Image: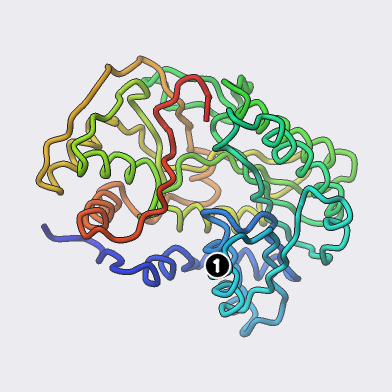
Amino acid sequence: MTKAVPAPESVDELEDRLSEPGDATVAALRDNPGDVIVLGAGGKMGPTLARMVARAARLADGSLKRNVYAASRFSSDPAALALQHAGVTVLRSNLLDLDAVQRLPDAPNVIFMAGQKFGTSESPARTWMLNGAVPALCAHRYRTSRIVAFSTGNVYPLVPVSSGGATESLPTKPVGSYAASCVARESAFTINARAWNTPLAIMRLNYAVDLRYGVLVDIATKIAAGTAIDLAMGHVNVIWQGDANRAAIEMLSVAANPPVVLNVSGSETLSVRDLANRLGSRMNATPKFTGVEAPDALLSNTQRSRSLLGPPSLSIDVLLDWVAEWVLARRPLLGKPTHFESRTGAY
């Protein structure tokens, strides 16, 4: 099969692709001078996003003339060392600790990524602390900065598949504790922004695709294992994680008061059954299915973000090519399923 874009063949090449800034990413940092801090940078997306900030800053400034900070507990030493090698200043910090948050360096540009999704069912109190209290602490600490805060499309109710997805004007109606705690996160940032006139942009993301995790990887690994794919949540949106990283940085130029909310994902409503069949054809395997598609799903309409930030750079066909090749080659996976099949909001 001829591939429109060559697939990454190693973790190093993958992370290089995931952290590659676009022209608009560079322009966003040129338009927003000064240091940048990424809060909660130790998760699945954080390291490549922080690295992208550093790469874009070099291009915007002619060299790395500003500090790029990545704050997290950093349970992974290799991730922290890789960031340091990329020119990012690593700050090992517990964002639940008020004193630790107060000791963080000043920065006029803030990207907030901290939070918890998986483990909510077993430890709901911790989820509420991480998704509600931490945002309140960080929003107040950086009340004089420009903030982009990650959120999720889970704050919306399930919408008809034929609707084209929830728009930003649809009132939130979270399903489950995780989604409700994410509304609390958004509220903490919004209330603080209104009190201090903080420029704020809220990024409602679903679902980012890396080749080591994501909805497409979940489907591909089930095909490879001969495991049935649940069709209960029969439709999804997905976006290349590199495009999601770029969107987060470019939203620094969108941040305003009153706060701006943008849905960030791919532009298509995708059938899980169709995705599985397309992956199966690339993997020379026949998918197995269980259940039937519901008439509604967790879907986002991204027309507004596409009008402001442009469309994603990678098509679904390229992502399917890349995921199929990665999984068939038995390259490293994170082993962190998205649980996109959940219709009850339990994670």
Whole-percent x, y for residue 155 in the image: 59, 28
- Quadrant of the image occupied by residue 296: top left
Whole-percent x, y for residue 74 in the image: 63, 61
- Give the residue at mark 1: 79
Task: Tell me which residue sits at (23%, 29%) in the image.
Answer: 228
Whole-percent x, y for residue 129 in the image: 75, 37
Where 319 sits versus 135, above or below? below
| Colour convention | rainbow
Task: Tell me which residue sits at (15%, 48%) in the image.
Answer: 283
Give the class, few, some or many, for how many residues have Cα within 10 Å of label 1's Cα (few <14, many ≥20). some
Is 115 on the left-hand or right-hand side of 239? right
What number of labels is visible?
Answer: 1
Whole-percent x, y for residue 319 in the image: 30, 51
Residue type marked 1: Ala
Visible in this render: residue 211? yes
| Residue farthest along the front direction in this orientation | 122
Visible in this render: residue 186? no
Where 333 sits versus 269, above or below? below
Where 57 sits versus 221, above or below? below
- Quadrant of the image occupied by residue 50: bottom right
Is 99 on the left-hand or right-hand side of 153? right
Specify the quadrant that holds the N terminus: bottom left
Task: Tell me which residue sits at (61%, 84%) in the image.
Answer: 62
Helix, strand or loop for disc 1: helix
Task: Tell me which residue sits at (70%, 36%) in the image.
Answer: 126
Question: Foreground: 236 or 83?
Answer: 83
Question: Foreground: 214 or 169?
Answer: 214
